[in-house]
């Protein structure tokens, strides 16, 4: 996966609000905030540019499995969401669906802030491919994933949370 520092501004990247897709990006961020599942996972989506999304998550002991570390469902959600929104930032008319997702767990995690970064890799018509990485509070990668996504029949404009500014 191509590396992208999470705290360093990216050189040569148009500021998010100045790009032609900025209204679509902000509407996707609104859609993310409106999703009921996110009440269980305090988090914030930022679509940095077309094809790149970052999600900041705060996890606590309520997200642990019986052995006292972050449960795999949280890893999956963070990585899938980051990859999904990276790809949906390129598709302005339809909601996408995850068709497959593979995970690689490299480090157990405890409570704290985590960052999931998703990046579009390929595809522009039927099937899209994206990858994502999960970064802990010390800047170390804790997991990565790759997913495939395809267009649904659901227009983004029909979703209550999708509100263009």
Image (cartoon, rainbow, N blue to C red):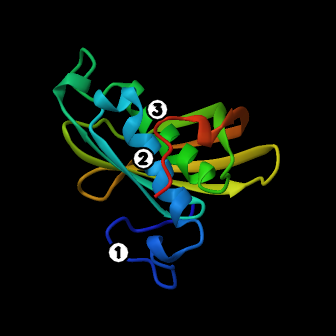
Q: Do the residues under discs 1 and 2 have CB atoms within 8 angstroms?
A: no
Q: Nearer the viewer, residue 52 or 111?
A: 52
Q: Is residue 22 left or right of residue 122?
A: left
In this view of the protein, can residue 106 be seen by the observer?
no
Q: Do the residues under discs 3 and 2 have CB atoms within 8 angstroms?
A: no
Percent of width and height locating residue 102: 59, 34
Q: Nearer the viewer, residue 20 or 79?
A: 20
For this orientation, the residue located farthest to the bottom is: 12
Image: 140 above or below 152: below
SS label for mark 1: loop
Q: Is residue 70 left or right of residue 12?
A: left
Image: 153 above or below 138: above
Residue in the picture at 29% in, 47% down:
114
Q: Is residue 19 left or right of residue 142?
A: right
Percent of width and height locating residue 139: 30, 59
Q: Which mark is first along the chain, 2 or 1?
A: 1
Q: Which mark is residue 8?
A: 1
Which class describes the residues within 10 Å of circle 1: few (<14), some (14-19), or many (20+)? few
For this orientation, the residue located farthest to the top is: 66
Percent of width and height locating residue 28: 50, 49
Between label 1 and label 2, give the one nearer the viewer.
Answer: 2
Q: Which mark is first along the chain, 2 or 3?
A: 2
Residue in the picture at 65% in, 57% down:
90
For this orientation, the residue located farthest to the right is: 125
Q: Which mark is residue 76?
A: 3
Residue hosting label 2: 30
Percent of width and height locating residue 92: 65, 52
Q: Which mark is residue 143?
A: none
SS label for mark 2: helix
Residue in the picture at 63% in, 56% down:
120
């Amino acid at each position: 996966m191509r590396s992208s520092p999470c705290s360093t501004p990216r050189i040569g990247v148009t500021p998010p609000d100045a790009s032609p897709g900025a209204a679509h990006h902000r509407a996707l961020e609104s859609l993310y905030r409106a999703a009921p599942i996110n009440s269980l996972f305090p988090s914030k989506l930022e679509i940095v540019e077309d094809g790149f999304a970052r999600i900041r998550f705060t996890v606590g002991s309520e997200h642990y499995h019986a052995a006292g570390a972050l449960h795999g469902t949280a890893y999956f959600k963070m990585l899938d969401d980051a990859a999904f929104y990276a790809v949906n930032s390129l598709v302005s008319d339809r909601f996408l669906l995850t068709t497959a997702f593979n995970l690689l767990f490299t480090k157990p995690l405890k409570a704290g802030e985590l960052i999931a970064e998703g990046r579009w890799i390929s595809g522009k018509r039927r099937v899209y491919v994206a990858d994502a990485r999960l970064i802990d509070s010390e800047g170390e990668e804790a997991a990565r994933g790759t997913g495939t996504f395809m267009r649904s029949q659901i227009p983004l404009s029909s979703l209550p949370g999708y509100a263009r500014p």
